[in-house]
Image (cartoon, rainbow, N blue to C red):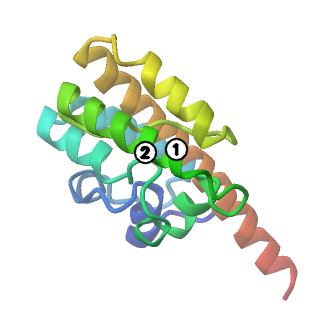
Amino acid sequence: MEVATHSVLEILFEGAPGLVMRCQPRPCESVADLLRRAETIARSMPEDAQIELLNAHPRIGAQPSNVSAMSYVEQGYDRDPGTTELQARLDRLNDEYERKFGFRFCVFVAGRSRAEIADLMESHMDASRGDELRRGLTDVFAIARDRATKLSSTTQEGSEDR
């Protein structure tokens, strides 16, 4: 993928204006270099900006109509609509997590089902707030790198079709 544009950064980070504003691409900068620089910037941002970055991502189990196209696929809505019981569990866990830590549970889903993610979320409830903030930021960048790879593949496929 060529140098990331502002709109690509918004896709990689679900909008997150604080980070997107700080990470304007440099000429001839690769996406990998941009993401490394963005992660360094994100880890040095004030906590409220870090939380904005985490909260830019939708809740696990958010209504499908309220998530981006990439989140829709990442959260598996296209593969498994889930159950009413699972949705109630995710809603309860999201509420509990956000109440305890003050930000959303953000995780690199990596093909796991929402039921597996609910178990994972539950296992993180005993973590410290600082540990969860750091882990969430790490996962935000795992998501961004995965998205960049997918966007690059789509771009390359599109240019091969021409």
Which residue is at 41% across, 38% downward? 106
- Near mark 1 (Cα within 10 A), the count class, few <14, some 14-19 or many ≥20, is few
Give the residue at mark 1.
85
Determine the residue located farthest toward the front in the rendered image: 85
| Rendered-image quadrant of the N terminus | bottom right
Task: Examine the image and state in which quarter residue 96 appears.
Answer: top left
Which residue is at 22% across, 40% downward? 51
The residue closer to the viewer here, 77 or 74, is 77
Query: How much space separates mark 1 and mark 2, taking CA atoms?
Result: 5 Å
The residue closer to the viewer here, 63 or 132, is 63
Give the residue at mark 2.
88
Q: Please say if the residues under marks 1 and 2 sit with CB atoms less than 8 Å apart.
A: yes
The residue closer to the viewer here, 47 or 26, is 47
| Rendered-image quadrant of the C terminus | bottom right
Residue 50 lies, in percent from the top left, at 23, 38
Amino acid marked by disc 1: Glu
Residue 157 lies, in percent from the top left, at 81, 72
Horizontal side, residue 47 vs residue 76: left or right: left
Callout 2: SS: helix
